Amino acid sequence: MIEPVRKDAALLRDVLEAHVADGFALWWLGQSGFLVKHRDGYLCFDPYLSDSLTKKYADTDKPHVRMTARAIDPARLGFVNVVTCSHNHTDHLDGETLGPMLASNPDLQLVIPEANRAFVAERLKIDASSPIGLNDGGVVEVHGFSLHGVPAAHERLERDDFGRCRFMGYVVRFGRWTIYHSGDTVRYEAMAGLLEPFGVDVAILPINGSRPERRVAGNLRGREAARLARDIGARVVIPCHYEMFEFNTEPPDEFVETCESLGQPYRVLRCGERFDSENLRLRSSAGGG
């Protein structure tokens, strides 16, 4: 079992005591989950902080054997102001994670694809009117964070009968900073052109790829994530969606090699590790670490 570099009380202390001023800090919580701190605001992307999938698939032909220990009890994240859910898969919309977070903070704002409103309400057992719904091209301001909806393709672009995206990424602007969290996605034709104008500081992209034998929808491969980050002009790219389940992971080696060959700045985090805005580098200085 991979142990987070910080977890439980140590992680919580690092988050609450981090001095960010007008910058920001972010922590990888495992899978596609990230916690962002800016000034007095906290935003969490797609947290998965339970063993719900391991329990659900324990006696099936597709066991979800966990690779990395849980970073923190979600009930301890009651100070979080905003949580995004990019789509309906449990590792991005987990009742055993979001239930305790909502119970700890009734004022927590949940941002979801509008197309998924009824599903989200049923899974989380909440009033269907309470989440904030977005579609691609939409924007909402929540607690100092400006969230822009962009399409995601997992593994294809899907829309409901009203033309609304079932899978979405979020471009989040706050202060002078911009973070793009893609959710689960492969690259689609218009993707780079859509994202490049945002001037992304940090791109958070999946690298587990796609293999038919997994029998689940796939994502960007490591080299594809590196190239997408380069093509949208991201100042740094951080990989995710690996080292959670044994059947659906890839090592970051291909991602790292491609970033280095392209001169694309990157940072590979360990679960529970922090990245600070002061570590951002200009495109002219390559490398990771």
Image: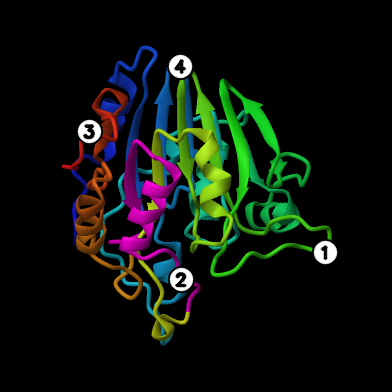
* Residue neighbourhood size for the residue with mark 4, other residues' Cα within 10 Å, grouped as few (<14), some (14–19), many (≥20): few
Where, quadrant-wise, is the N terminus in this rendering?
A: bottom left
Which residue position holds label 1?
A: 161
| In the displayed structure image, the side of residue 162 where residue 214 appears, left or right | left
The residue located at (32%, 46%) in the rendering is: 238
Q: What residue is disc 4 on?
A: 40
Q: Which residue occupies 22% across, 33% down?
A: 10
Specify few, some or many for label 2: CA neighbours under 10 Å numbering under 14, 14-19, or 20 or more: many
* Depth check, front residue: 165 or 100: 165
How much space separates mark 2 and mark 3, taking CA atoms?
A: 33 Å
Toward the top, the furthest residue is 21
> Is any atom of residue 30 visible in this view?
yes
Q: Is disc 3 placed on a helix, strand or loop?
A: helix
Q: Is residue 49 visible?
A: no
Which residue position is annotated with label 2? 218
Spatial separation of the CA atoms under disc 3 and disc 4 = 20 Å
187 lies above or below 286: below
Q: Amino acid at mark 2?
A: Gly
